Amino acid sequence: MSNAELVYEDLIARGKGAVNAKRWRAWIHKFEACCGVKDDYNRADVIKYLAALREGGYNQNSINTMIRPLKLLCQIQNWDGKGVFPRLAMPKVRDDEVSRPVLSKEEVGMLIREAKKVCTKHELAYLAAATVYGLRREEIGTLEVFDGVVKIHTVKGGAPAIQLIPDGMKEYFNEYHQVRDTRWMSRVFKRIVRKVGFDLGDGCGWHTIRRALATELVLCDVSMLNILRFMRWADASLKGEFGMLIIYAKREQAKIDDSVFAVHPFLSYWLERTLTKDSEVSYSIRNVNSPKVLLQIQLATDINLHPQISLSNQLLTHN
């Protein structure tokens, strides 16, 4: 078995996501192409690889990420009989060196408006999913759409999330179909941008919309805990910041979704309708919330089965 497959199987065996495992496997192949296929490596091999990465134009942040699979390979192969990765004095990445493009609320709104004029139903379904839930690229193509909810398979090791579909958005999600090729999903984003005639520059992709949503929810004064849970960051990664609140605060996803949808920055752009003959808007964009959906999720004992979802609609009385 190749070193790349050893790393891949180690990650899969420990319950890591297949997308991330495939990425690490590809990086080990890149390392082997530079240093050869061996049963043991040393500091000189790592330095040779680092030099090749720098000559290839990779920035420090990317290099730090691409070194991580080597550390796992070091443990698996037990380099030098100790399994200790060579010490490297790597430069720190300053905040001003990290380029993370983000769109404004108005830019996302213009993207949605123009896309509704020129894009296909499938393209609109992906754009709707990205702008409503702030999905990562790997998550957009793996949704499961049910009656009134979506099941989102997170890529950061967390449990799948069951989240509401806002009223008025169901028509878009009805056109959704799964595509697990992340590179194809990147091409979909570029195709949408090209169709609407936008020039977003290099580095923009689905994650740009995710950053925009997080930014706007903060500006809307949504509680930080609700933002973190609406956008599916794993609780384990938040304990250092929120301490015991993560443990004691009950996670009621339907209520979280409902509160976020009430101030969601991008929903109104999707729910806009043209004027009728009487010069009235044909659909109210003020009530973006669907009737309350109570989720009773009973996980199947067989991990190969989908969670069984029982939905019962109960209309709320609004003041």
Image (tube, rainbow, N blue to C red):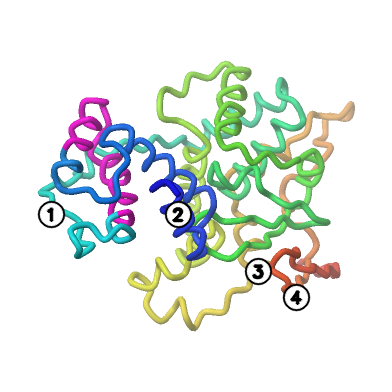
Give whichever of discs 3 and 2 has the lower sequence position. Answer: 2
Q: Please tell me how crowded label 4 is: few (under 14), some (14-19), or many (20+) other residues with Cα within 10 Å.
A: few
Please tell me the numbered disc located at residue 218: 2
Residue under pointer 3: 255
Give whichever of discs 2 and 1 has the lower sequence position. Answer: 1
| Tag 2: amino acid | Val
Give whichever of discs 3 and 4 has the lower sequence position. Answer: 3
Q: Position of residue 45 (x, y in %)?
A: 19, 41
Question: Which of the two residues, 123 or 222, is positioned nearer the viewer here?
Answer: 123
Residues at marks 3 and 1, CA–CA distance in whole angstroms: 48 Å
Give whichever of discs 3 and 1 has the lower sequence position. Answer: 1
Question: Which element carries disc 1, helix, strand or loop?
Answer: loop
| Tag 4: amino acid | Gln
The image quadrant of residue 191 is top right
Image depth: mark 3 or mark 1 in front:
1
Residue under pointer 1: 87
- In the rendered image, the quadrant that contains the C terminus is bottom right
